[in-house]
Amino acid sequence: MKRHGGSENFGKDWFWFRYQHSWERKQNAERDRCLHEASDCLELSCCEANELGESGCLNRILVTGAVGQIGTELVQALRKKYGRENVLAAGHTTRPTQELRESGPFQYLNVLDREQLAKAVVDGEIDTIYHMASILSAVGEMNPQLCYEVNMGGLYNVLEVARKHKLERLITASSIAVFGPGIPRDNVPNKTILLPTTMYGMTKVAGELLCRYYFAKFGVDNRTVRLPGIISSETMPGGGTTDYSVEMYYAAVEGKDYTCFVREDTVLPMMYMPDAIKALMDLAEADGSRLKRRVFNVNSMSFSAGELAQSIRKIIPGFTCDYKPDYRQAIADSWPRSLDDSAARQEWNWKPEYDLRSMTQDMIQRLRRKLAK
């Protein structure tokens, strides 16, 4: 062990040496336990036997942005699989739901405070982070300075903590916002020109590059999913350009008319939340030896705003929708209509489960139960 100065620094070095040695012993012991009891790995909150080996086990998980649209449902899915006490949900200012608070540990955490983030990782013996904290596209255009600060500063802090504490894995969410003019609108390949027109998209492009750098330079095993527009029955959207899709369902179930902020013929790639959660978790658990890249397109369905309204009218015939595009139309027009996700399908067997028809049926059924309470 190399000394850096006086006794105070030596003491700190000795503390971290002992901590790291203890942590490595615990990780190795847990890995051996899983290997010898592979048939019971799921019950032991470990990864499946065929996912063990060089990638180790995902045992203790931190989810940032846990009170957001994706984080809320991601936390519940992770707790169901890995155990409620093994998943720490972290939010910043939004109050968590009672269900989230009661289902497992929660703490307020600012991803811009690296010391606070590192303390949560050390205290919770975290080995995996799902980094979901982000300012979205529409809100980001209203406050681009905040968007840059949170999206870039937060990701940098998470990567640094993952590097310094040798975390097993880091999962992040990118977006179709990375794309822009100059690309084909349909079946956009995984590798293409990235020229976003929004601050949100720019932070996502820079974030993808930063994650690749940390993998190549420091060996931080980070994996990123480029998500399309996300539709959820559980949590209201938080300022994205595709929010109209969720708002339309709510209006229909509540018996209200809806004014859509994009044109009727606006086509965007969309995904139902259960498939988004599945994509994040499947990539986290994928065999690292099969992965040839760090960032993956995932595709599910594409439809126009008018086609969405029509699918709702098949169940709620009286629903009416008109269209008055606002500033978000320009953002939508810069995004692709569909994605080529063949790399994800080949490298980690990605396959969505929902299409427009099955999603609409499930969304309306869930919202009717939810709003009847």
Image: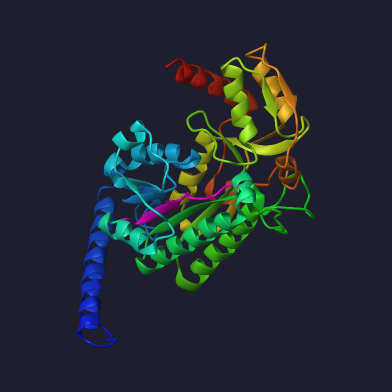
If the image is split into quadrants, where does the N terminus sit?
Answer: bottom left
Q: Residue at x 67, y 39 (%)?
A: 269
Q: Which residues make up the magenta segment?
A: 126-136
Residue 338 appears in the rendering: yes
Of 67 and 364, nearer the camera is 67
Check the picture and name the quadrant holding the C terminus.
Answer: top left
Confirm whether residue 308 shows in the render: no
> Horizontally, is 29 left or right of 53 in the view?
left
Considering depth in this image, is 204 or 323 the residue closer to the camera?
323
- Give the quadrant of residue 71: top left
In the drawing, does residue 161 fall left or right of residue 299?
left
Answer above or below: position of 350 versus 6. Answer: above
How far across and how far down the image is residue 75, in percent? 39, 41
**Residue 80 spot, x, y in % from top left:** 35, 36
Q: Is residue 123 magenta?
A: no
Taking depth in this image into account, of 254 and 142 the one nearest to the observer is 142
Q: Is residue 333 left or right of residue 110?
A: right
